[in-house]
Image (cartoon, rainbow, N blue to C red):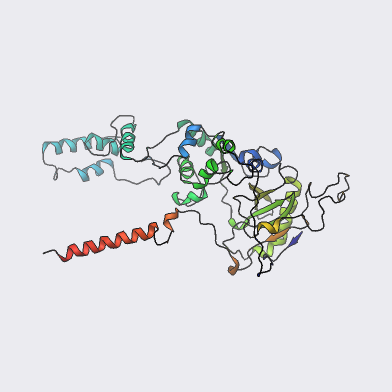
Amino acid sequence: MAASDGHAHVDDAHPPVDEVPAPSVADVDACRCAAWHALGDLSSHTFARRHLALPPDFVAYLLEDGLSLAADSQAMPARIRPDIAEQMESAFTLSDEEDDAGVADARVVSDSGGMSFQQLRATLGGGGGGSNSSDGESSDEEEGDARSGVAPVRHFPELEDAMREAIESLGGAVTPKLTWSSPKDAVWMATTNDTRCQNPAEVMLLLKASDAVAYDLQDAYAQCVDASESSSAALTTGVVLTLRKWAGLSPSMEFRCFVRRGNLRGVCQRDVANFYPFLPEQVGQIEEAIAVFWQENVHGVFPVLDYVMDVYVTSRKKVKIIDFNPYGGATLPLLFDWNELDGPPRGHDREGPDRDGDGDGDGCDGGGFTDDLEFRVVESQGHIRPAPQLGVPFDMYDRSADGALANFVEQQRRRQEAAAGTAGTAP
């Protein structure tokens, strides 16, 4: 094993073209979260989790346009409101409503009891299409939303109950993951700005708002060499949601491992947008822990020879598996280029002699080598790389001349000019 200085040395005059490897459908399927968790030897080296099969109607809902939340959705902060009588008295006071209808409205307010604001508003003739049924159903509201083009609020009682039970069994907080992807790109929708979920509503909000989840359900095989229409159609069948126990992992100790032809060729820090001063000093210890863990627990167990493994190293240098990803395709090489990881390890021929003395002629096809392992970390603040633009809608950071921000600024300017013109002509 050899630790590097974290920088690739190439001829700047003729930089090599980095070709992204194309995985097979079988390689991508091997990285399904539920699939590799089913391998007993690997599942014992990851975090506590629960798998939930998603019903077809919920999968279809994830691919629908639009998102609406119920007024009492747990995905949003609990609103602290005045007493219901105070709310209604502020809108219907005897001083404002001196006729008989106003007196009757005030009497309804005083007798409202446990009625919700929407029910009370509907009783008093307010807008919004609220239902005045005693069980609080919002069918009228949903029909009104449909007529106005707003996505209706959807409910999946059985799935929500299963999620709630799983969350409770995992300590009350989880992070969700669909077939391959975690909805990290949707954390801008969450009140905590991370993927930590404490109830089904928060899980559903992240899944519904995530483009990464939509990618899993539509385009996960797009870069496969043997992709077909039938394989792509299968992406929406047998979908499994994984709820992993929330652990609050430190990004500084997450690492990406690259396995090529069964050999561990490279490891680098996963968060390439930050410099962690203590990491360069611990490269030797972390490299040794990961290499030994991979040789003893992963090599020979994971069913394909080319893959990427994300791991977490604890303060005691214990390694935990976070995830597996296809080698190439949509997986990012981070501090490496794909061509740096290709080719057999130095000093090991593909059909070399038996090196471990077991008589099986173990060459590169069998793999298991870490001799040529290169470990890279960001070694100074000046060597950090831009992070992928995840977490906000494109329109919020698109600064092009015809982008959404430019159009918004132009509309505001016109409004201000119009308002100034109106003020100038006033008597």
Pinpoint residue 149: horizontal percent, then vertical percent: 33, 40
Horizontally, residue 34 falls left or right of residue 410, namely right
The vertical placement of 303 against 275, above or below, is above
Pinpoint residue 114: horizontal percent, then vertical percent: 30, 35
| 17, 157: nearer the viewer | 17
Horizontally, residue 59 falls left or right of residue 279, namely left
Measuring 86% from the left and 46% from the top, which residue is drawn there?
361
Horizontally, residue 200 falls left or right of residue 322, namely left
- Quarter of the image where one finds residue 297: top right
- Quarter of the image where one finds residue 281: bottom right
Pinpoint residue 303: horizontal percent, then vertical percent: 71, 41
Quarter of the N terminus within the rendering: bottom right
Looking at the image, the residue that sits furthest to the top is 134
Measuring 16% from the left and 35% from the top, which residue is drawn there?
104
- Quarter of the image where one finds residue 46: top right
Measuring 47% from the left and 39% from the top, which residue is drawn there?
62
Is residue 286 something one can see in this rendering? no
Is residue 24 something one can see in this rendering? yes
| 232, 212: nearer the viewer | 232
Measuring 60% from the left and 67% from the top, which residue is drawn there?
383
